[in-house]
Every structure is written in C-alpha cells, then in structure tokens.
Image (tube, rainbow, N blue to C red):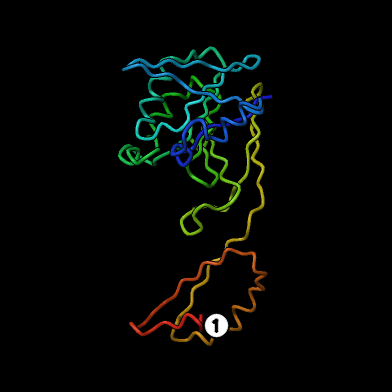
Amino acid sequence: EFYQEFHGNLQNKYEEINSWLHYLEEKAYCKRLSYEKNGEEYKFIPYKIEDVNFYGLGYPGFVADKVLEELELALNPQEKNIVLIHTALGGGEEEGSLPGLVKSSSLKNLKDKVIYIAGGHYHSKSTYPKEEPYFFIPGSPEYWNILNEKSDEKGFFIFDTNTYKFEFNKVEQRKRMKISIDYVNLENYEESIKSLLLTGEELLIVKLILQTNSYVSTKGL
C-alpha cells in the first residue's frame, strides 16, 4: 500500500534520524518521497504504482516555485503524474513570495502534465482552479489557528486515477463559534450566552467591544 506522507514546515526543525516519518518508513508503514539537487541540477525520481508516477517534493519553502518549474520540465505529459508538495496558493504573483506558498502561474504550467497535485500548508479545504481542479488541499483534521482559518471544511479527497473524478469527504471537528460582547452591557449577555447551550467542547471566540479604556474584569468575563 502507498501512503501520502511527507514533512511539513514544522517538521523540518527535527533531525532526520528523530523524524517520526523515518521511524514509520523503517517499519515499512510508509514510503517517503523526495528529489535530489546538485548545484543547479535537479533530479526527480518517481515512485511508480501500476501506471501512476508519484513525485514527492516535501516542503520546499521559499524555493517552491523554482522546484515546480524544474519538475514541469522533467514530466512527461503522456504519463499519469501525481505530485505531493507541502504548499498552498499564494493568491497572486506577488503574494507567492510568502514563505512556503506558490504563484498561480506555477500551478498553471503543470496543468497538462499532472492529474493531481496534493497540497497542504493551509489548514482548510481548497482547490484550484475552480472549474476542473487539479490542485487539492483537504484541510487539517483539527483547527490550527482558530481565529484565521477561512473555512470549517476539513476532510480528505478520494481521487480515481482512471476516471480523474474526485470526491470530498468531510470530517467532523470541534465546533467553532464566534460571539461579540459589548463590555459596557456585559450583564445583558448572560442569558444570550446561556442560550448557546455550550457543552465545554466548543472553540469559543469572543470579541470584546470596549467603549473606554476602563479596567476589564476577567472574573466578570
């Protein structure tokens, strides 16, 4: 069996020998994929399963666009190619320079040479382009940043390498709730907060509205 496994940006701080992926590979539970770089020369070695080539690029960081550019030159469009890379779309040509993100042009160049690109880095579901996507981010199973994650959709994709059809399966995570409280009228919110029927398992985001610079009673909150 083949498992999609590769380091993300937070795993890079560990020594290779201490990596949990290294341990799993030693136990034959997964196969890690990578590429080689010697000076300006790139070498991409696919892991083949039946008629599908798998290319693992790990987390390229600032050079993600360059790595995809070099890979595009090496791929045979007559073959079925799947790419695994820990990155997300930067949203524009300039935004692509942010750490770990790629420009839309880097993905567009791969359109006719891949059947599927498995992305990551962002923690909510997204696909690119909107119509007939080939770049997929399923989202992390749980929230990583409860304030800034754009979507509550998280799960996994099932992709058919024969028909190129896919389906998204959503997983259930803790409920994220947002409420606003005017601190001046804090007592008026007691009943409305009770009506939320909180169980204690929710991720509750409270926006506190202050009219003055007066002292905030944390006990009252």
* Residue at 63% over, 37% down: 157
Image spot of residue 82 (x, y percent): 55, 23
How many numbered badges does the structure rendering display? 1
Q: Which residue is mark 1?
A: 189
Label 1: how many residues lie within 10 Å, few (<14), some (14-19) or many (20+)? some
* Residue at 65% over, 46% down: 170
- Image height check: is 76 above or below 171? above
- Image height check: is 46 above or below 89? above
* Residue at 42% over, 77% down: 209
- Image height check: is 58 above or below 213? above
Answer with the quarter of the image where residue 97 lies.
top left
Image spot of residue 76 (x, y percent): 49, 12
Rendered-image quadrant of the N terminus: top right
Answer with the quarter of the image where residue 110 lies.
top left
Q: Is residue 148 left or right of residue 23?
A: left
Image spot of residue 177 (x, y percent): 57, 65
Q: Residue furthest front?
A: 17
- Image height check: is 37 above or below 147? above
Front-most of residues 199 and 176? 199
Q: Is residue 70 left or right of residue 112?
A: left
Secondary structure beneath label 1: helix
Image spot of residue 218 (x, y percent): 47, 80
Q: Is residue 44 left or right of residue 200?
A: left
- Disc 1 residue type? Tyr
